[in-house]
Every structure is written in structure tokens, then in C-alpha cells.
Image: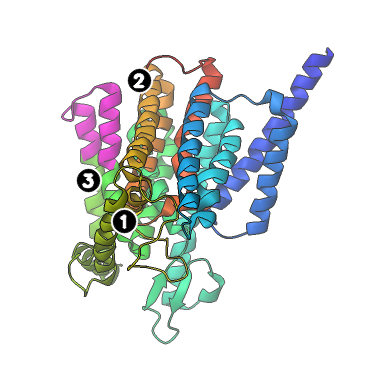
């Protein structure tokens, strides 16, 4: 074996080890957000060092590089505008709009083969199983008191030992559910491409996921779970150019809603109060003008306050980290608001918002392009796009993408592009 082959094999071995480290980090970000901080910091440092030492072995799709470059420049320009305007929150948001995207680009550079991407897929499934079992066990610990509820510190916000039925699950991993439950639902569309054992596991996972959705009781989560089958079917229709009323699509839709009907019917015997609370909260969530619906009313006030602030700088906005003069949702962080896309309009203006959503549109279009010409990638693309779109819908109500721990939901769809580019040796400067 010549020297170049030995070096090449050593580089591949290092890359494989780095990939496993990346998968461990990925699991911790999905299932343990804002936990095990030092472990994550070590894993990130190892990946960055590996990237630096093996820079010549790094292969990143031209499309991915261009997309990230545009995204980072967009963020940097509006950070500069924020600095120029002396916005109070600009320094706090600097890492979100500049540093973290660069770190994620390094992560994606380690994902070059379909085998590695399949490991990421499996990681999402395992993380979703972990989250569901953790939440269900916490709920059972409150109901039966056979297990000390205090050991479930991630899920626990408050509980009453005298009245255990009064509980509130407020874990950071709930945000991950807004991606992974729609993701798991979309995988069931592709039953022909999976083994029977995988399909059975997905049905079991879906049951556990839906029970978790009932227990955590978040309006945004319920809405995206309901919408996710339609998102998947729309994507599939665009890719395969099938009619919504085709036999395949109709059969999938019929099976899914029969399953949902049976699931709700059975769970209604066990979770009567929880289902009633979900129904009541959904109604309250849309009563924007009623002060009794505190959360909805706060967003109602916030919406109009942000729109008034945006009107002062319609085209280019007020810069990242801007605050409102007579309105604040958080005295400690006056630049923080729930309505992410209205905040985006307020801080970046029409030009910034159009640029941001153009980048998202290009990302979706590129994924669809790959799915059309390569059937093997369809299961990965439809599921990741379903998860990403669902997550972005939920993001409208809370700034989930404003944290390093949850930004993976946006960038996973870029990873599959990088894989396809590497596997097929395409430059991605080709036409869509």
C-alpha cells in the first residue's frame, strides 16, 4: 500500500470518528437541549479541531457554501445595522446570526455519505423514543407516585404532591417534538421503502409520540402535528406529480385518519382531562382580543406594537436587537418577542424578510429537485422537509430558531444536499 493510500485511509478513519461524535452531539441537542452543556462544548470543540486538521479532506457542496454565505452575510449586515443604531440586544444576538451558522456549516461538512445521513435519521428516531418514554414515565410518576417525580428534572416545572393531577411539563425538548413528530409521521408514507420491522417500530413510535403530544399540551405542537400529513402529501404530489385524489395518496390519507380516529377514541378513556384541556387551550389560543386568554392577548398586543415599530423603517428595518419604545415582553431581555417573523419584519424590514424567505424557498426547491431525479432520496427529503416546514410554522409563535440547540431543524435539509452532491459528484451550479 502506497503512502497516499495510507494517508487517505487515516483521513477516512478520522472522518468516521468525527461523524460518531457529531451524532452524539446531535442526539444531545434533540433530546437534551440546554442540558449537559460541558459535554456539548467538548464535542463541538473536537469537531472543530477535526475540521481544522483535516481541512483538505473536507468536501462541501457549492450550493451549501453559497447558501450559508448568503445567510451569514444577511445576518451580518443586519447585525451591523443593529450596532450602528446602538440596539440594546445586538451583542446578545451576534452568535445566533453569525457564529452558530458557521459552526453548523462545519457540522454539515462532516456529513458526506448516505450511510452517515441514515445514522442521523436513526438518531432522530431514538431521540424521539427517549423523549416520549421520559415524558410518559414522568406523567406516570405523578399519577402513581411509585417513582419520585423529582428525578425527572428536565420535564418538571411544578407539581403538587397533594394533588398530583396538577402538573405542568415544561421541558426544552418539547421544541424538538415540533420537528420530530411530523418527521416520524411523514416516514410512514414510504412504507414500500422500509422493512416490516421498521414500519412496526414507526407505528409504535407514533403512538408514543401522540401520547406525548397530549401530555405536554402545546397549541403549536398540536397544530403542526395535524398539518404534517398534509405537508408531506403536498410535497409528495409536487415531487411525483400525482393528483391528490390518486389511489396511493387517497389510501395513505385514509389509513392515517382511521388510525387517528381509533387513537383518539382509545386515549379518550385514559386522558379525558388532558384532551379537554387541549381543546380548551386551542380555543383560547385564537381569542386574541380577549384579556382572559393571556398568552394570545399578549401576542395580539405584541403584533400591533411591532408593526408600529416596523413602520418607522419599512424597507430595511431597525436592525437586529432593536427594542420597542413603549412595549416590552421581558424586562431583562427587552429585544425578545414571541412572534418571530413579525420581529424579523421589525428588525430587517421588507428587504430582509424577502431575502430570508427566498433562501428558505431556494432550499426547499433544491431538495425537491433532488427528490425528482433520484427516488432513493425521496424518503429523506420529504421527511426532513416536513419536519423543517412544521418547525418553521411553530417558530412563528416562539423564537425557537434563535437558539443554537434548535437551529439543526433548519439546517438538516442542507445536509442531504451536501450528501447528494458528494455522492454524485455534482457541483449544484446546474439549473433547478
SS label for mark 3: helix
The reply to whether residue 230 is visible in this rendering is yes
Question: Left or right: where does residue 142 sit relative to residue 247?
Answer: right
Residue matched to label 2: 372
Residue matched to label 1: 220
Q: Is residue 273 above or below residue 339?
A: below
The reply to whether residue 141 is visible in this rendering is no
What residue is shown at x 42% (from left), y 49% (from top)? 319
User: Are dots 2 and 1 in contact, CB under 8 Å?
Assistant: no
Is 228 part of what is drawn in magenta? no
Question: Left or right: where does residue 402 sit relative to residue 258?
Answer: right
* Viewport quadrant of the C terminus: top left
What range is drawn magenta here? 229-253
Q: Position of residue 406 (x, y in %)?
A: 48, 50
Judged by its main secondary structure, the magenta piece is: helix
Residue matched to label 3: 257
Q: Earlier in the sequence, mark 2 or mark 1?
A: 1
Q: Looking at the rendered structure, which numbered label has been put on residue 290?
A: none
SS label for mark 1: helix
Q: Position of residue 75 (x, y in %)?
A: 47, 42
Which residue ends up furthest to the bottom in the rendered image?
Answer: 162
C-alpha separation, residue under disc 3 versus residue under disc 2: 27 Å
What residue is shown at x 53% (from left), y 26% (from top)? 419
Front residue of 188 and 356 = 356
* Viewport quadrant of the N terminus: top right
Q: Position of residue 114 (x, y in %)?
A: 54, 27
Amino acid at each position: 500500500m502506497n503512502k497516499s493510500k495510507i494517508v487517505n485511509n487515516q483521513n477516512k478513519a478520522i472522518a468516521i470518528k468525527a461523524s460518531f461524535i457529531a451524532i452524539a452531539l446531535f442526539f444531545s441537542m434533540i433530546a437534551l437541549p440546554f442540558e449537559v452543556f460541558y459535554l456539548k462544548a467538548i464535542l463541538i470543540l473536537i469537531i472543530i479541531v477535526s475540521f481544522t486538521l483535516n481541512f483538505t479532506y473536507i468536501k462541501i457542496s457549492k450550493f451549501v457554501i453559497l447558501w450559508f454565505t448568503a445567510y451569514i452575510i444577511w445576518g451580518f449586515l443586519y447585525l451591523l445595522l443593529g450596532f450602528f443604531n446602538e440596539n440594546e440586544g445586538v451583542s446578545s444576538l451576534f452568535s445566533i446570526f453569525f457564529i452558530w451558522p458557521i459552526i453548523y456549516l462545519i457540522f454539515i461538512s462532516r456529513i458526506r455519505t448516505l450511510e452517515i445521513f441514515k445514522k442521523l435519521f436513526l438518531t432522530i428516531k431514538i431521540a424521539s423514543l427517549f423523549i416520549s418514554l421520559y415524558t410518559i414515565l414522568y406523567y406516570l410518576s405523578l399519577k402513581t407516585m411509585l417513582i419520585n417525580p423529582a428525578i425527572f428534572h428536565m420535564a418538571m416545572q411544578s407539581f403538587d404532591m397533594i394533588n398530583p393531577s396538577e402538573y405542568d411539563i415544561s421541558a426544552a425538548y418539547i421544541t424538538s417534538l415540533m420537528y420530530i413528530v411530523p418527521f416520524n409521521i411523514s416516514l410512514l408514507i414510504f412504507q414500500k421503502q422500509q422493512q416490516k420491522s421498521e414500519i412496526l417500530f414507526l407505528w409504535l413510535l407514533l403512538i408514543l409520540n401522540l401520547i406525548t403530544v397530549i401530555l405536554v399540551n402545546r397549541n403549536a405542537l398540536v397544530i403542526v402535528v395535524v398539518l404534517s400529513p398534509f405537508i408531506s402529501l403536498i410535497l409528495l404530489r409536487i415531487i411525483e406529480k400525482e393528483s391528490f385524489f390518486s389511489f396511493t395518496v387517497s389510501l395513505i390519507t385514509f389509513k392515517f385518519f382511521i388510525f387517528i380516529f381509533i387513537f383518539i377514541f382509545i386515549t379518550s378513556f385514559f386522558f379525558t382531562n388532558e384532551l379537554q384541556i387541549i381543546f380548551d387551550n386551542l380555543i383560547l389560543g385564537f381569542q386574541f382580543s380577549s384579556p382572559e386568554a393571556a398568552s394570545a392577548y399578549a401576542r395580539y398586543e405584541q403584533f400591533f406594537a411591532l408593526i408600529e415599530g416596523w413602520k418607522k423603517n419599512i424597507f430595511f428595518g431597525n436592525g437586529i436587537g432593536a427594542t420597542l419604545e413603549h412595549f416590552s415582553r421581558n424586562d431583562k431581555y427587552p429585544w425578545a418577542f414571541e412572534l418571530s417573523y413579525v420581529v424579523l419584519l421589525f428588525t430587517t424590514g421588507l428587504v430582509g424578510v424577502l431575502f430570508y424567505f427566498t433562501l428558505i424557498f431556494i432550499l426547499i426547491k433544491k431538495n425537491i429537485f433532488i427528490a425528482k431525479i433520484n427516488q432513493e432520496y425521496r424518503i429523506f427529503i420529504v421527511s426532513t422537509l416536513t419536519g423543517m416546514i412544521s418547525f418553521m410554522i411553530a417558530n412563528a409563535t416562539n423564537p425557537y430558531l434563535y437558539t443554537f440547540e434548535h437551529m439543526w431543524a433548519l439546517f438538516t435539509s442542507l445536509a442531504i444536499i451536501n450528501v447528494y452532491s458528494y455522492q454524485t459528484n455534482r457541483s449544484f451550479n446546474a439549473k433547478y
